[in-house]
């Protein structure tokens, strides 16, 4: 039979025939001239597919039936859950299940005849239940709303770690990152149920116009919200376990695209107000804001704790702060008198041990060498200058040791002015860039003068210097100072 004959005999519209054929749900025989011939079995199958279409089976469900990812029994059970009690579509699903019908065998014609009685009342055929009707099948909006929430929790946690516990946000190790992820998820688990109970939404959901409530429109209890969020963390995000979380996200995406209710949303009403363009723009701008705040927190951490006119004791506090922040001088700390003290005086240090640190590049030095002794100029109890003179003769030496001290002094004392900028330009970056990669410099930035003079005779090398083997005396000396040149107003 041709498709026109199928329409005449089985009452299936041509558009439906083409749709089901294109999905390979019916496979007519193709003749040599290219025409298609449909069998009686194809006609009966088309009737079954039309019936399933009328009672609300989705296109994705048809594809799953074809690939045998799902059985007709399971499909009808799911459809019954979606439908309102008393509607004809739900009764038909129930009757097909009771006769244990299979896709290729149940009699669709008798059900199609029942549907004709409702031609003038089509609204009574397919009525979705409230739990299913109030669901949002927009996976990307849901995913981005969740991501924005998690970014905010992460930002709050970073603020606590950075400014309460003084953890370096710039140089976080992988252990800290793992702990941060766990704590951020715990924060979401505890805070989100409270937000849903009080407001019916979270910040990310609010941006996209999403709401989560009970089926009757009342707020979720904290316990119900906690159960829902925990279900989402486990079945939706795979407990944030690497690789497994990607598997769960993909499965949740496929479930949402198939218009299936997520396991954690089965007892709630999930609605969306609208999908207007400004919500996406707002989401993008808010993400830029979160990134900017995170960047600003890193910059703020690079400012010294004490600013303005400072004492030696405050300078020592700044110095120790930067040592911890950049993970340098791990064997020493500066006492309140401004002198470096060995934390472990009884420890035997390997002379071949090299210490690595970072200020945008690598530095190395022999920890057995004596560190420079700082000199201070004080006026009215406030520091006016910090300097040191350091030299070696006739021995190998890592010059990075005193360069590290230069940077620490420049930040802990030189960049303490109230006018120091975090952005455009960043004062610390400007100052350190003028000091890097050069031995001698003399410049003023703001109210502070930075000076360094290096004398080197009989040595070769830069970061690591060695005496020239010609019997000549090798001499190396660095004179470094940071001075406040601010003039007092009358």
Image (cartoon, rainbow, N blue to C red):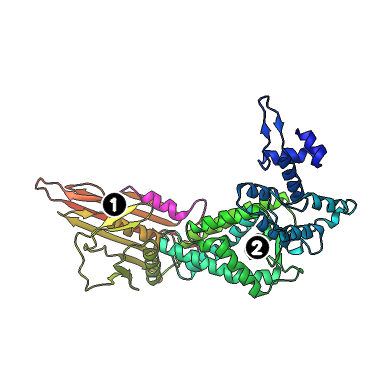
Q: Are dots 1 and 2 in contact, CB under 8 Å?
A: no
Magenta stretch, residue numbers: 423-439
Q: Position of residue 119 (x, y in %)?
A: 88, 50
Task: Determine which of the numbered discs, if any, sits on residue 453 in the image.
Answer: 1
Q: Residue furthest right?
A: 120
Q: Residue furthest left?
A: 471
Which quadrant of the structure image shows residue 131? bottom right
Q: Nearer the viewer, residue 431 or 446?
A: 431
- Mark 1 secondary-structure assignment: strand
Marks 1 and 2 sit apart, C-alpha to C-alpha, by 56 Å
- Mark 2 secondary-structure assignment: helix
Residue 460 lies in the magenta stretch: no
| Residue 162 in sight in this render | no
Which-is-in-front pick, marks 1 and 2?
2
| Residue 434 in sight in this render | yes
Q: Position of residue 52 (x, y in %)?
A: 74, 51
416 is higher (above) or lower (below) than 104: below
Q: Nearer the viewer, residue 326 or 416?
A: 326
Q: Nearer the viewer, residue 79 or 255?
A: 79
Q: Which residue is mark 2?
A: 203
Mark 2 closeness class: few <14, some 14–19, many ≥20 residues within 10 Å: some
């Amino acid at each position: 039979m041709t498709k026109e004959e199928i329409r005449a005999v089985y009452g299936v519209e041509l558009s439906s025939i083409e749709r089901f054929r294109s999905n390979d749900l019916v496979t007519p025989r193709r003749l040599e001239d290219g025409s298609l011939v449909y069998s009686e079995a194809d006609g009966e199958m088309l009737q079954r597919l039309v019936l399933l279409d009328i009672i609300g089976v989705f296109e994705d469900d048809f594809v799953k039936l074809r690939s045998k990812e799902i059985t007709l029994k399971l499909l009808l059970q799911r459809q019954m859950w979606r439908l309102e009690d008393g509607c004809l579509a739900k009764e038909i699903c129930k009757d097909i299940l009771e006769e244990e019908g299979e896709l290729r065998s149940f009699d669709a014609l008798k059900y199609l005849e029942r549907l004709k009685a409702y031609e003038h009342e089509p609204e009574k055929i397919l009525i979705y239940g409230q739990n299913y009707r109030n669901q949002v099948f927009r996976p990307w909006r849901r995913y981005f709303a969740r991501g924005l929430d998690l970014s905010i929790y992460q930002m709050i946690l970073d603020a606590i770690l950075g400014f309460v516990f003084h953890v370096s946000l710039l140089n976080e190790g992988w252990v800290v990152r793992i702990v941060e992820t766990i704590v951020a998820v715990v924060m979401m688990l505890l805070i989100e149920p409270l937000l849903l109970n009080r407001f019916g939404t979270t910040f990310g959901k609010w941006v996209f116009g999403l709401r989560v409530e009970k089926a009757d429109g009342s707020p979720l209890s904290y316990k119900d919200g906690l159960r829902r969020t925990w279900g989402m963390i486990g079945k939706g995000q795979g407990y944030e376990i690497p690789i497994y979380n990607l598997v769960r996200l993909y499965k949740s995406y496929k479930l949402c695209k198939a218009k299936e209710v997520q396991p954690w949303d089965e007892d709630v009403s999930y609605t969306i107000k609208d999908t207007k363009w400004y919500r996406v723009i707002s989401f993008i701008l808010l993400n830029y804001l979160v990134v900017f705040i995170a960047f600003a927190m890193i910059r703020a951490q690079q400012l010294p704790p004490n600013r303005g006119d400072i004492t030696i004791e405050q300078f020592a506090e700044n110095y120790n702060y930067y040592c911890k922040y950049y993970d340098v001088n791990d064997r020493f700390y500066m006492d309140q008198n401004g002198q470096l003290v060995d934390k472990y005086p009884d420890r035997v240090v390997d002379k071949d041990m090299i210490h690595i640190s970072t200020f945008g590049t690598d530095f190395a030095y022999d920890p057995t060498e004596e560190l420079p002794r700082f000199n201070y100029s004080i006026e009215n109890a406030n520091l006016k200058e910090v300097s040191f003179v350091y030299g070696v003769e006739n021995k190998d030496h890592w010059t990075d040791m005193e360069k590290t001290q230069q940077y620490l002094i420049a930040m802990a004392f030189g960049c303490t002015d109230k006018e120091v900028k975090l952005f455009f330009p960043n004062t610390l970056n400007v100052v350190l860039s003028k000091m890097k990669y050069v031995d001698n410099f003399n410049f003023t930035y703001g109210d502070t003068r930075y000076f360094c003079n290096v004398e080197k005779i009989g040595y070769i090398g830069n970061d690591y210097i060695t005496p020239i083997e010609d019997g000549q005396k090798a001499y190396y000396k660095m004179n470094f100072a940071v001075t406040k040149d601010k003039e007092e107003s009358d």
